[in-house]
Structures are given as C-alpha cells and as structure tokens.
Amino acid sequence: MRTNAHPILLQAAALASAVLIMMLTACAPLVRTTSPAPATDARSRDTYFPHTSPDFYFYLLAAQLSINNGDWAGARDLYLSALELAPGSPYILLQLSHLAVILGEPDKAEEYCRFVLEQDPHFFEARRFLARLLSSQDQTGAAISEYRLLLAERPGDEETLLTLASLYSRLKQPEKALETLNELLEINAQSANAYFQLGGIYTEQGNTRAAEKTYVKAIELDPEFLPPRISLGALQEDAGEPERALRTYQEAADLMPGNRPVRAKIAYLLVKTGDLDAALAQYLNLLDTAGQFDEDIALRMGLIYFEQADFSRAAGMFGRITAHNPGNSQARYYLGHTLEKTLQFEEAVREFEAVAPDSDIFPQARIQIALLHSRAGDRHRTQQVLQDAIALKPENAALYHALAVAHAELQDYPAAIAALQQAIERDSGDEDLYYYLGHLYEKAGMFDESIAAMRSVLALNADSADALNFIGYLFADRGIRLREARTMIKKALALKPDDGYILDSLGWVYFRMGRFKKALHYLERAHERVPEDPTIAEHLGDVWQQLNKSDKARELYRRALERDPDRQSAQEKINNLEKE
C-alpha cells in the first residue's frame, strides 16, 4: 500500500528532479573534446516527468539516494516503481538502462534503450548510450550503425567522429578511420584527439615517421594532454631510442607527477640505459608513495640490487616481499639465487622449495635445487629432485633437459639420451635440444646419430654456426668427406669470424687434406684466441711436426699436457720426439 510522500521529501523533489535530469542527460564523454558541447534535447518538462502524484518524486529521490549509497538493485526497484506512475518515461528507462549495465544485465540495458528509441528515434542521449553499450559488448558493426545515426542527428559531433574512427580501427579498416578523422579535422583543425588517434593508426601501419609527427602535433595543440606523450614515448622506445623515450616520459611525468605508470616506465628505461642508481631512486619513490606495499616495485628494486652484486640489500628486499606475502614465488626464487650467491646453500634450497608448483618458474626452481645438490656431489639427490618435479610437470621440456645433463654427468649416456628425447617430444622446435643430443650421441660413440641430430639443428636454423662446425669437425677428425667439411666450416667461420674453435676446425680440415701451411695459418690464429685449450695446442703441435719443426711441436704438446695432464696422446707424441 502506497502512502503520500513526507512533506520534507516533497520539498526536496524539485532538487532531486534537477539532479536526475543532469545525470540522465550528461553521459561522460569517451574522449577529451575541444569543441563546445552540443545543446541538450529540446524537450518540455512534461516530457521529462509527466504530471503525476507526489509518490513519483519520492521514488526519484529515494532511487538517487540508493545510487549514492551504491545500492544499485534498490535504485532499480525504485525506478521501476516510478515507471509504473509514469509509463514509458524515456529518462527513467534510460536510467534503468544504466543500472542494468552496472548490475551485469547488458541485454536488459539494450532492451530499455531500444524501447526508448522506438518511442523517440531522435533521443540523442539514449542512442549514444546504446552505441556505447554495443561497442562495449564487441558488437562493433551494430555500434557503428548507431554512431552513423548520431552523426545524421548532429553532423560534425567531435565525440561521435572520434569514436567512429576508433571503431573502424578495431575492425582493421584504417582507411575508413583515416577518412573519419580527416573529416573531423576539416571541421576542427585544433582537435588534439584527432591527431592522437591518427598517430595510433600510423603506428599500427608501421609508419613511424607519420605517427611521431601527429603525436607531436597533438602535444602542440594540447600540451597537458597526456596520452600522446605516452604513445610518443612508446614509439621512440620501440624504435630503439631509449634516451629519447626517457625524455618524453619525463615530460609526461612533469605534467602529472603523481602518475605512477609513467614513473614506473621512467625507472624501467633507466635500467635499460644502465643508470641503475637513478632507477633505484625512482623505484624507491614509487615504493614510499604507494598506498600499500607494492610487491612488484620491491621485486624490481631487489633485482637491481642483485645486478649491482649488493646481495645483502637484494636479500633484504626479497625478504620484505616474502614477509608481506609468503606465497610470492618470484620473490622466493630470486631470494634463493641471492642466498646462493652468498654461499648460503641450505637456505637457498629452502627458498627454491617454497616456489609453488602452479608457478611458471617452478620448473626452473627445481632445476636450481638439483644444480645445488649436484655441486655438493649428491648425484642421487640431483636426479631424485628432477624426477619428482617431472612427476608434477610431465610436459615441461626443461626438466627433461636438466635430467639429461644429470645423467650425462654420471656418463650414463643412454639414460641421458632417453631423457633428452623426452624433452624434444615436448619441444621439437628448440634447436638447443637437438644440439645437445648430437653431443650426447658423439659421447656415446654413435657417430651417425650425432650427425643426424646436428642436421636437425640445421633444419631449424640453417645458419647455426655451432652445428655447421660440429659436423665439419667430426668429418675432419675422421678424415672423411673433407670437402663437405671444409664448406660447412667456412660457412660457420663467416658467421663467427673470430671464433677460435671454428678456426681450429678449419685448420684441422686442411691438416687432414695435407695442406700443412694452410693449416698452420688457421691453427695459429685459433691458438691465439683460445690459448688455454689443450686440443688446439696439440693440433698446432701436429702441424709443426709435419713441417719438421720438432722443438716447436714439443713445446705445444707440453702446453697441451699442462692444461690437461691426463692427455695421453700428447704425452705419447712427446715420448716419440724424445726417441728421435
């Protein structure tokens, strides 16, 4: 049963009505505009709110109070009651449409809007709300149709033209978007927003010069308009100009000192340009001014301390994060690395163990634990950690790769090969896995399989200098297919001109061909670049022996033995020279 509204409420009804009209007729614009706002629809007071009982105004005021208190469902029910007293009221229906969106009922919101427009097709605010609603629901084509109708109602409306251009861009129709923006600029050549959107389109097209020009124009027209400055900074960053980007972001920060994302971007670029102390100062300011402890900023600070080898501060920062949030797996992982650097191995293992199984870095954390056990000489524990991790993450290729390494350290090459084949099944596009498989086959004495694995590397990357060199060296070492070996190694050397090991391989090919002076040229260069390698020293000794320079050969063999005392081949060659 309804009762008459309280007199005090009736006195407030006029104010409530005015507030409601302002709320209903003024939708927040999607973009910053520079042209004057259009006049509101010319409708009489009776169209807004037909003459009705005082209860009608009571419901309006009560609904507004419910909105102020965040009681969206209560406001909806009160507007529905008002609608019973003023059936078909367009503004109440539009307000119900707004509330339906808030309450997660977009279909209902669209129904209300379309009902209003059936009654009054020229109700601009209702159509604009419908267009926005359709756009938010990814009904881009339907939204464009509504915005075209809005343009017919108000030709040259800046917000409508800007939104249309944005929707055309969403549909990957840059020509229509450019046409729409140019139409706007003919009407308002001072539209910073139009130039800003033009910059976005040019960026998508890869026309960075035009994009930069239009972003700069937008900034000139409206120096306090932040988005074009941020987009310009991103453009410069993507172009590999971090110093210019840094200056642009700093200008944006000067305009809006409290903009945290811009400050974070500045700190990131300072890290990228190597100014770690300045980056730390930025991050520290962000951390101190945050409303609550910012784990991401603290993590970045910890990583900078780690990079600076300030492991005490790094551990302190990562520790703050884990104290605040024990479930932060990234902080646990990096704290483990920090403790490892300070030789606190047991503590490091505990931190790695605290990384959650559902974390992306769980496999790497388990690999680090296995590595620590391996360094401690506990090979059984190493394999057990990896096998347990594989039981939890059976599709992770990196875990099988690590297990293969663990088996190889025990010279159990069949087990290592089997584990690596499991890794390749899970990541057949990783050339490094095939390369390591080739090494394992070679260690196991499986020559043909080793060559086949290296050819798999070349199938993925024809310019893999390491695979080319590996195959060429194997051929040369066996004295077979020497021309093919020379071709492959020359290609590898062209890719890595200063690589000592590739120079050694080419020298060894020429040695096998009997071209000793040519071999000497490359082997001397190889020995200069990798003087500590015993194989290269022995190869160079072999060349000098063939050139009848026994003293030089003996000296090189001795160097090889110094670097590898168990090198029997070098010792035998010295013995043979002593007998001469």
Image: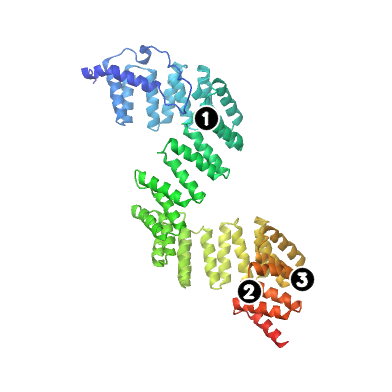
Give the farthest residue toward the left: 7
Amino acid type for the residue under numbered disc 1: Glu
> Alpha carbon of mark 3 to alpha carbon of mark 1: how far?
69 Å
Say which of marks 2 and 1 sits in front: 1
Taking depth in this image into account, of 108 and 334 the one nearest to the observer is: 334
**Residue 231 locus on image (x, y percent):** 52, 37
Instruction: Count every numbered label the image shows and give the total.
Output: 3
Question: Which residue bears the numbered disc 3?
Answer: 517
Q: In this image, 545 relative to 343: left or right?
A: right
Question: Which residue bears the numbered disc 2?
Answer: 534
**Residue 571 locus on image (x, y percent):** 65, 82
> Alpha carbon of mark 2 to alpha carbon of mark 1: how far?
66 Å
Q: In which quarter of the image is the C terminus?
A: bottom right
Crowding around mark 2 (Cα neighbors within 10 Å: few <14, some 14 to 19, many 20+) is: many
The numbered mark at residue 162 is none
**Which residue is found at the position 40% from the left and 13% from the top?**
43
2 or 1: tag closer to the N-terminus: 1
> Alpha carbon of mark 3 to alpha carbon of mark 2: how far?
21 Å
**Residue 16 locus on image (x, y percent):** 30, 20
The numbered mark at residue 220 is 1
Amino acid type for the residue under numbered disc 3: Lys
Residues marked 3 and 1 touching at CB (< 8 Å):
no
Taking depth in this image into account, of 305 and 129 the one nearest to the observer is: 305
**Which residue is found at the position 75% from the left and 77% from the top?**
546
Answer whether residue 208 is visible to the viewer in this image.
Answer: yes
Asked if residue 335 is positioned above or below residue 558 in the image, the reply reads: above
3 or 2: tag closer to the N-terminus: 3
**Which residue is found at the position 61% from the left and 61% from the top?**
434
Disc 3, SS: helix
Q: In this image, 65 relative to 226: left or right?
A: left
Disc 2, SS: helix
